[in-house]
Amino acid sequence: MKSFLLCQTARALATVSVLIWHQMACAQGVGAQEHRGEPITTDSEAIAYKLTPSFYRTTNQPDAYDLNLRANLVSHAAWVGFYRRANEFQQLRVGYENTISFPFGHLIPSMQYATRGFLGGSLNAEIGERYFGLLGIGRTNLKDYFNLNFDPNDAVLIGAGTRVLPNTTLSAFQIRDDRLGTGQRVFHVIARIKPDARTRWTFDLFYKDGRAAAEDEVKVHGTGVSVTYDFDRYFVRAASDPHVNFTKEHMVRLAAGLRF
């Protein structure tokens, strides 16, 4: 019963958030464009949900769990999530992003708030169509936050990609700390392959190096991989990260979920 109530509450929060932002954006004349990688919602009244439960196993740490619900309405997306690692750390977060389309590409501003006083935001751009460039910047208020994207948050992004191959999107980019002096860098090579209308594979090969904090003497480096398989409304994901959040610890991440 408790799990059912949590899911219903999360769905209601995500729905309310995305509807509020949609009304604000319509009043300001923001154009509609679905976010790449999420369900296409051409109906301005239809909200597409994505529910992602995740499990994290890390060496020398207790296991952790996360539940995230994302709601997409045309160009708008809102999410609510909850992370817990035993009795050591737990955090509730909410966020919003909007995909603004231009003749030459897309601009995606986003913002996120989490308990423990965390506040962060980012601005990313995709310029071009068959061949495209990627640019981005992220900033936070440096409050406690468990980073679930495992890249530096206070960082810049630069990269490029192509859609020239049939049913395939290829991209390569680097995310680099430009604020805290940690030297953190993550280089991603991502392939999204859609062999048919019901199936999609996503492969993310990444190499990272840097220190967990600027004052640390030890610099880590290593290669990790993430694989996601989508079939109709369902998906599964597995990832291996040899130096999670630039520590000496190895993390295995497992996720499974559905879109509805």
Image: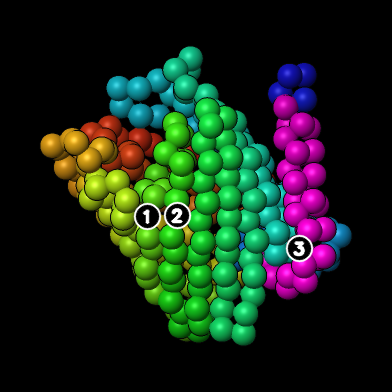
Per the image, the residue denoted by label 1 is 155
Per the image, the residue denoted by label 2 is 138
Drawn side of residue 244 relative to residue 218, left or right: right
Please indicate, yes or no, whether residue 41 appears anywhere in the rendered image: no
- Type of residue at label 1? Ala
- Type of residue at label 2? Gly
Q: Is residue 142 above or below residue 126?
A: above
Label 2: state its secondary structure. strand
Contact between marks 3 and 1 (CB within 8 A): the answer is no
Please tell me which residue is depicted at 46% across the width and 45% down the height of the picture: 140
On the image, the x and y values in percent for residue 111 come to 58, 50
Contact between marks 1 and 2 (CB within 8 A): the answer is yes
Q: Residues within 10 Å of mark 1 (few under 14, many from 20)?
A: many
On the image, the x and y values in percent for residue 144 come to 44, 31
Q: Residues within 10 Å of mark 2 (few under 14, many from 20)?
A: many
- Type of residue at label 3? Ala
First of labels 1, 2 by sequence position: 2
